[in-house]
Image: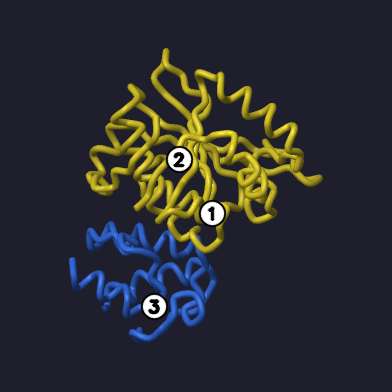
Chain colours: A yellow, B blue
Amino acid sequence: MIRFIKLREEHLEQVLEWRTQEDVTRFMNTDIEKDMNKQKEWFKRISHSETNAYWIIEIKGQLVGVICLNGMDHVNKRTSWGFYIGEEKYRLYGGIIPPYFYNYVFSTYGFHKITAEVMEGNDNVIKLNLLHGYRMVGVYKEHIFKNGSCYDLHLLELLKEDWIKLNKFQKYNGVFEQ
Amino acid sequence: MEKLLAIINEIREEAGNSTIETLASSMDLREDLHLDSLMLAELTVRLEDEFDVDIFEDGIVQTIGEIIVKLEGK
């Protein structure tokens, strides 16, 4: 029912629409302009990147959001990641989409750790991460300057061994396009 | 039902809402219980944790009754 489709050029317009929605950008570290040319340039860059990978989240045939690996560090075997659901109706899937991703990432890539950054105020996401087995690493104080104000950035990490030890969500295995 | 009520009340309290006494099958998760999408996301994880059930396996659920059907059918 949930599929993860490799991001392609045909998705860029939809992704730009989601990525510039106020309810999506609110807790993003960076904001982007609603500019299709820049979006295409960004796509070109990430398409050739060995440290980033992007998928479109599809639920029951409906494209609903984006999930990605960023800063893949194959030397130290760790990666950062992120996701958002652009379609409000499907945001309630925000608790179970990450487990699909963790099962895929830990079983496919050789990473032993996933790290996450969550902006101040995004308490529900911190709570979800903790329920998924993350530990709080610390807080960068006043780390993000956005809309004229500084915000803290919470740092979390999920070790592969802690994910396995949690022994939950193992049945969440999705189809990820290579 | 008691455990489900406890989980929902915990989520509601954390969001600054008052607790409720009872649940009814007809209650709408958003309209009656005022659970927003992120609260519902947490609810799914808590239910998975407690009952080992993916309540969205066949699609979006909207009422307490639909959750109970999922929990009873596991």
Label 3 element class:
loop
* Pointer 2 residue: A136
In this image, A174 relative to A36: left or right?
left
Q: Residue at x 67, y 51 (%)?
A: A26
Find residue A75 and report its image quarter. Answer: top left
Rounded to the nearest angstrom, the CA distance separating label 1 from label 2 is: 13 Å
Label 1 element class:
helix
The label nearer to you, 1 versus 3, is 3
Cβ–Cβ below 8 Å for labels 3 and 2?
no
Residue A169, how many percent across, how many down?
A: 27, 48
Label 2 element class:
strand
- Which quadrant holds the C terminus of chain B? bottom left
- Neighbor class of circle 1 (other Cα within 10 Å; few <14, some 14-19, many 20+) is some
Q: Earlier in the sequence, mark 1 or mark 2?
A: 1
The label nearer to you, 3 versus 2, is 3
- Neighbor class of circle 2 (other Cα within 10 Å; few <14, some 14-19, many 20+) is some
Amino acid identity at mark 2: Met
* Pointer 3 residue: B63
Q: Residue furthest top?
A: A75
Amino acid identity at mark 1: Asp
Rounded to the nearest angstrom, the CA distance separating label 3 from label 2 is: 34 Å
- Residue A123 marker: 1
